[in-house]
Image (cartoon, rainbow, N blue to C red):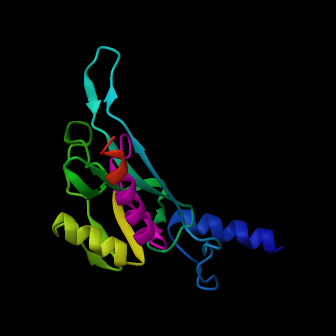
């Protein structure tokens, strides 16, 4: 019977609503998993530079909440020769969906997407919950929220910067 209620809670969480008798049906039981890595310049088979060398911090988070769907596996921070940045989702394609929109980002209920890059990073590193809008492309052409907790974000960011320091000297 417990598995039936769990399945019902999962369906309600996916639908974006939670019945009143269920308190946070998908409460995460394990800490967020962070991965940090670096990659060299990416060159296509014809010698054209596709992407500059960079390091990144990526989170794995699969728990839905009332705030939105789980972020899944997503890059949160990147650093390259231009500096560190918070990774944001791509906006709606005006040519396909007809409406362009700036995608919002918030940490702990405060919008941060209009802050400077360093302030955005500081908010995420010191925050507890990140929510970012994501484009759901054609044929849906709408936005939804994706969310993750930020447990371990500070350590992952520091490790990414440490690795970039070593990687960029190679």
For image coordinates 48% across by 71% down, the residue present is: 152
Q: How far across and how far down the image is residue 136, in percent?
A: 38, 49
Q: Is residue 136 visible?
A: no
Is 96 in front, or is 115? 115
Is 7 in front, or is 81? 81
**Dividing the image into 4 quarters, which one contains the C terminus?**
top left
Is 3 in front, or is 162? 162
Q: Is 102 placed above or below 121 here? A: above
The answer to which quarter of the image holds residue 20 is bottom right
**154 relative to 70 in the view: left or right:** left
Question: Can you name the residue that lies furthest to the top here?
Answer: 46
For image coordinates 53% across by 64% down, the residue present is: 15
Q: Is 139 placed above or below 135 here? A: above
Magenta stretch: give its range: 134-163
Q: How far across and how far down the image is residue 48, in percent?
A: 25, 21
For image coordinates 34% across by 59% down, the residue present is: 161
Is 96 in front, or is 29? 29
User: How many marks overall?
Assistant: 0
Q: How far across and how far down the image is residue 167, in percent?
A: 36, 46
Q: Is residue 7 visible?
A: yes
**12 relative to 82 in the view: left or right:** right
For image coordinates 16% across by 67% down, the residue present is: 114
Q: How far across and how far down the image is residue 128, in percent?
A: 42, 78
Residue 140 in magenta? yes
Residue 44 in magenta? no
**Dividing the image into 4 quarters, which one contains the N terminus?**
bottom right
């Amino acid at each position: 019977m417990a598995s039936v209620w769990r399945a019902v809670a999962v369906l309600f969480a996916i639908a974006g609503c939670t019945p009143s008798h269920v308190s946070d049906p998908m409460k995460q039981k394990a800490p967020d998993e962070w991965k940090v890595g670096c990659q060299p310049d990416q060159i296509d088979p014809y010698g054209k530079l596709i992407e500059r060398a960079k390091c990144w911090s990526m989170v794995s988070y699969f728990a839905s909440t009332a705030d939105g769907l789980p972020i899944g596996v997503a890059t949160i921070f990147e650093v390259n020769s231009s500096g560190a940045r918070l990774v944001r989702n791509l906006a709606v394609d005006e040519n396909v969906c007809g409406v362009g929109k700036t995608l919002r980002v918030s940490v702990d209920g405060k919008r941060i997407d209009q802050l400077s890059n360093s302030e955005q990073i500081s908010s995420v590193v010191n925050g507890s919950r990140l929510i970012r809008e994501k484009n759901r492309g054609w044929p849906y052409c709408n936005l939804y929220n994706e969310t993750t907790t930020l447990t371990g974000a500070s350590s992952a960011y520091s490790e990414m910067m440490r690795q970039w320091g070593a990687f960029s000297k190679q």
